[in-house]
Image: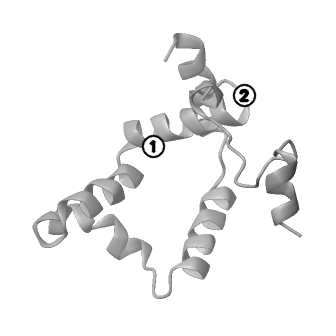
Amino acid sequence: MDALEEESFALSFSSASDAEFDAVVEQLLERIPGFNMAAFTTLQHHKDEVAGDIFDMLLTFTDFLAFKEMFLDYRAEKEGRGPDLSSGLVVTSLCRSSSMPTSQNNLRH
């Protein structure tokens, strides 16, 4: 991440308002029945009680640097600066081609 990206992130993050935070919490409450932000923020104290991968994923929400990296990756992808995966994709038709020999084409009828 270059200095310009970091400065841009700091400016956009610092301009986030309490209303935006409240909107995120509201979405969490709508999507996760029984979600409790206070309980969520205490997860680090209970890390021995939570499975490793799940705990690591949940901690990324409270770890600022991990959150920042996720935010920058999302923004880069949204702006078209993400990795180009198109060279690794191959599209293959599952339908038979219309260029079949006539003998095979007659078998379809």
Q: CA distance from mark 1 to mark 2?
A: 20 Å
Q: Residues within 10 Å of mark 2 (few under 14, many from 20)?
A: few
Q: Nearer the viewer, residue 92 or 81?
A: 92
In this picture, is 5 found above or below 54?
Answer: above
Q: Which three-letter amino acid code belongs to the residue tagged 2?
A: Gly
| 66 or 94: nearer the viewer | 94
What element does badge 1 sit on? helix
Q: Residue under circle 1?
A: 67
Q: Residue at x 53, y 21 (%)?
A: 6
Q: Earlier in the sequence, mark 1 or mark 2?
A: 1
> Which residue is located at x 60 percent, y 13 percent?
4
Instruction: List x then y, in percent, for residue 27.
Output: 62, 71
Residue 7 occupies which quadrant of the picture?
Answer: top right
Colouring style: one colour
Q: Is residue 89 left or right of residue 47?
A: right
User: Does residue 17 lie above or below 22 as drawn?
Assistant: above
Residue 37 percent coordinates (x, y): 43, 72
- Compared across the picture, whether 39 is left or right of 21 comes to left
Residue 104, how many percent across, how many down? 79, 55
Amino acid identity at mark 1: Phe
Which element type, helix, strand or loop, lies under badge 2?
Answer: loop
Disc 1 + disc 2, Cβ < 8 Å: no
Locate residue 58: give its quadrant. Answer: bottom left
Farthest-out residue, front: 103
Q: Quick one: 109 or 58, which is closer to the camera?
A: 109
User: Which residue is label 2 attached to?
Assistant: 80
Residue 24 vs 82, above or below: the answer is below
